[in-house]
């Protein structure tokens, strides 16, 4: 397998370079979709696209059992060297490359066409919005899937280069958008209006005073605030904000959102303003599937050795991959955690990682699929 993968090295690196240099944000992965679609069709594969959104699915083989691998596609919108732009600082360019590499490796090994097994390659948009997986579910992409595998690069703070985990146990996460609706006032007459900035500050202060069971990790913080215009002598009565919520369990998330709603209601009364809020995206906490994890851990041990295999990673980060198992409880699913010397950290505008680790990820996932096929057939 190593020899076949090494023969693919230059082609895989070219694919990564293209994807890295052409990032696109959530739901706008148009050129990325076109590029991957054309690449697969040129190799003779049938590709399914979607009329109303980006993303694609490729199937090969036949049979009653379906094994799927999934990658996210979208980049982040962030400031890089003083300019806001799309930027692959979460590793989705690497994830796409790894999944394509798995396809190419299985192709080299002549393991794709199987009368008893269907393989499905899912290129999912809008993971960063927390809504891409839900759209794939809506399209019925997961209806026939029995085993589902994914991958995510891990920051150096969680996992060292050369190590891997058979599962990533993400926590639950939620994004709440809100609007403060008060009245503008002259800066010299603050008593005639409501200062939305002060209201937002009060929200932040109360969020910092939330206390729930400290044995379960959680966090809540305001990540976006817009208020005021170009005139410095106007007190803004209106503002919009976003609150990012994290909790290691779905039960803790329910408690956290209840606390946030109480805070917004109370501050609305105290400051005599209307505060509207809505949840714009949710990502459930991970559920463990021991069968899928054991299959992947076997592949990891074979690829890099048992000494480089670590237990499932518990992380406060969120991942919409877990919508699949929440909505399709029968799925046997897990996500590879890949150590790759990723620093300074995920979502950092200058994020860098050891690109050679992609080849380790390709081999691990390819072995995982082959072991799954063997398990199903035997």
Image (cartoon, grey):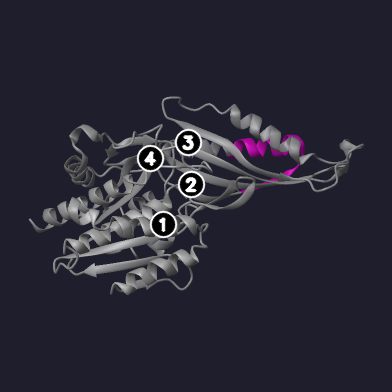
Q: CA distance from mark 2 to mark 3?
A: 10 Å
Q: CA distance from mark 1 to mark 3?
A: 28 Å
Residue at mark 1: 133
Q: Earlier in the sequence, mark 2 or mark 3?
A: 2
Q: Nearer the viewer, mark 4 or mark 3?
A: 3
Q: CA distance from mark 2 to mark 4?
A: 12 Å
- Corner quadrant of residue 275: top right
Magenta run includes residue 269? yes
Labelled pair 4, 1 in contact (Cβ < 8 Å): no
Residue positioned 59% across, 26% down in the render: 209
Labelled pair 2, 3 in contact (Cβ < 8 Å): no
On screen, 325 above or below 259?
A: below
Q: CA distance from mark 4 to mark 3?
A: 11 Å
- Most prominent secondary structure in the magenta stretch? helix
Q: Earlier in the sequence, mark 1 or mark 3?
A: 1
Residue at mark 2: 89
Q: Nearer the viewer, mark 1 or mark 3?
A: 3
- Corner quadrant of residue 302: top left
**Range covered by the magenta-colored residues:** 261-277
Mark 2 neighbour density, 10 Å: few (under 14) some (14–19) many (20 or more):
many
Labelled pair 4, 3 in contact (Cβ < 8 Å): no
Residue positioned 41% across, 42% down in the render: 353
Residue 328 screen position, x and y as percent:
32, 55
Secondary structure, mark 2, is loop
Residue 201 is tagged as none
Q: Earlier in the sequence, mark 1 or mark 2?
A: 2
Q: Earlier in the sequence, mark 4 or mark 3?
A: 4
Mark 3 neighbour density, 10 Å: few (under 14) some (14–19) many (20 or more):
some
Residue at mark 3: 344
Residue at mark 4: 154
Labelled pair 1, 2 in contact (Cβ < 8 Å): no
Q: Nearer the viewer, mark 1 or mark 2?
A: 2
């Amino acid at each position: 397998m190593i020899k076949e993968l090494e023969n693919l090295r230059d082609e895989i690196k070219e694919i990564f370079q293209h994807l890295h240099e052409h990032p696109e944000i959530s739901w706008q992965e148009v050129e990325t979709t076109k590029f991957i679609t054309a690449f697969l069709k040129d190799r003779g594969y049938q590709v399914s696209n979607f009329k109303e959104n980006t993303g694609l699915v490729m199937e090969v083989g036949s049979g009653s059992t379906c094994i799927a691998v999934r990658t996210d596609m979208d980049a982040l919108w962030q400031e890089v060297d003083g300019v806001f732009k799309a930027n692959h600082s979460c590793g989705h360019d690497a994830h796409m490359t790894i999944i394509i590499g798995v396809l190419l490796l299985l192709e080299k090994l002549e393991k794709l066409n199987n009368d008893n097994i269907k393989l499905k390659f899912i290129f999912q948009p809008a993971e960063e919005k927390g809504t891409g997986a839900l759209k794939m579910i809506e399209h019925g992409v997961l209806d026939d899937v029995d085993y589902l595998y994914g991958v995510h690069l891990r920051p150096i703070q969680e996992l060292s280069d050369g190590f891997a985990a058979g599962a990533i146990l993400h926590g639950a996460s939620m994004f709440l958008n809100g609007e403060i609706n008060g009245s503008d006032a002259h800066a010299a007459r603050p008593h005639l209006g409501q200062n939305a900035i002060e209201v937002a500050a009060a929200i932040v202060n109360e969020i910092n005073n939330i206390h729930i069971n400290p044995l379960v990790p959680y966090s809540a913080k305001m990540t976006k605030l817009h208020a005021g215009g170009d005139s410095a002598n106007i007190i803004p009565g209106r503002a919009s904000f976003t609150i990012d919520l994290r909790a290691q369990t779905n039960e803790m998330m329910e408690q956290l959102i209840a606390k946030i709603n109480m805070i917004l209601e109370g501050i609305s009364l105290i400051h005599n303003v209307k505060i509207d809020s809505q949840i714009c995206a949710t990502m459930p906490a991970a559920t463990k599937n021991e069968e899928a994890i054991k299959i992947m851990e076997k592949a990891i041990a074979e690829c890099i050795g048992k000494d480089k295999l670590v237990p499932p990673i518990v992380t406060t980060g969120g991942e919409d991959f877990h919508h699949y198992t929440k909505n399709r409880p029968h799925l046997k699913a897990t996500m590879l955690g890949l150590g790759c010397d990723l620093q300074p950290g995920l979502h950092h505008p200058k994020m860098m990682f050891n690109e050679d680790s992609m080849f380790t990820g390709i081999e691990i996932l390819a072995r995982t699929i082959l072991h799954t096929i063997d398990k199903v057939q035997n």
